[in-house]
Image (spheres, rainbow, N blue to C red):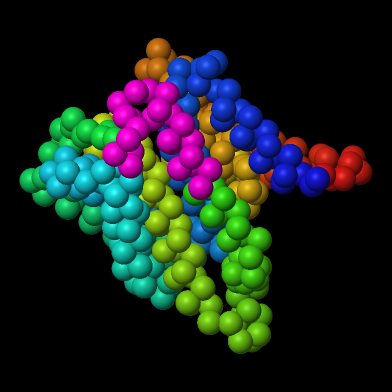
Amino acid sequence: MNGKHIGWIVLLLIGLAAPFVVYPVLVMKILCFALFACAFNLLLGYTGLLSFGHAAFLGSAGYICGYSMQSLGLSPELGLLAGSAGAAALGFIFGSLAIRRAGIYFAMITLALAQLVYFLALQFPFTGGEDGMQGIPRGRLLGLIDLSDTMNMYFFVLAVFLFGFWVIDRAIDSPFGQVLKAIRENEPRAISLGYDVDRYKLLAFVLSAALAGLAGATKTLVFQLASLTDVHWHMSGEVVLMTLLGGVGTVFGPIVGATIVVSLQNYGAELGQWVTVLTGAIFVLCVLAFRRGVVGEVAHLIKRSGIRP
């Protein structure tokens, strides 16, 4: 049994026990942001592409899911599917334009496109503008399970998270994931080996967008709200923070990073705006002392100690 298998077991046990120890809605929020951060890490950590516009996929999927359930009467599973498909389509458009450039130019293109989505979300009548889309029904899963019950909703969110995380884990370990790592390490060499680099980048971008959309649609169900906060550029900055704090390029790092950031925001709410300063200070400390992130540093220490994972 290797380290990844142990990590999966620990993750599953914590997921099953968490709602009986911590407020379930907080854990659901952490799971949604953890999936969002893992989706972002697939792009940054394994493909080497820094996107400053991932909030567009999180927020747009939330609006699509909310509208499809509130106005069209779709079931929760179809609402999540619609949100994820919408985010994937948006990711295809963004990716097709952005991958033509590299580095900071790629990041700036994604940011500009995301700001366009923010403007549209602010102007479209069905989004509710600054008030957001409120009162979104949770519905009944498969027509049987009432998701208005908090525990039913929690285990549904846990299942969605585990599914999304499993997809990312399988993608990383697949031949597709190995090509992404090759592109990250040395793109010219990957091209010389005959790989269509732009095609792989676009596929990674669309997959990352779809899973970020799945996280956004799930978050909308949890809070029964789709708001401008999720599509704002601040959210794109937060997911970068979560990923770097936990450990970019590590499988479980974004989960740890999301847990730290969301917990700080929740338990530090009494500090008001100072919680942002506290989060920034922790981030600076992490960059200076733990440059590999929390999980990356732990893995490095284990490797140095000679303990086999």
Image: magenta residue range: 141-163
Total numbered circles? 0
Q: Is residue 62 visible?
A: no
Q: Pick the residue in front: 308 or 69.
A: 69
Q: Quadrant of residue 87?
A: bottom left
Q: As drawn, is 233 to the left or to the right of 208?
A: left
Q: As drawn, is 130 to the left or to the right of 169?
A: left
Q: Position of residue 251 (x, y in %)?
A: 63, 48
Q: Pick the residue in front: 288 or 203.
A: 203
* Residue name at image x 66 percent, y 61 percent: 173
Q: Is residue 81 visible?
A: yes
Q: Is residue 300 magenta?
A: no
Q: Quadrant of the N terminus?
A: top right
* Residue name at image x 60 percent, y 58 percent: 170
Q: As drawn, is 138 to the left or to the right of 135?
A: right
Looking at this view, name the residue that lies furthest to the front: 144
Q: Quadrant of the C terminus?
A: top right
Q: Pick the residue in front: 49 or 102.
A: 49
Is 143 situated above or below 107?
Answer: above
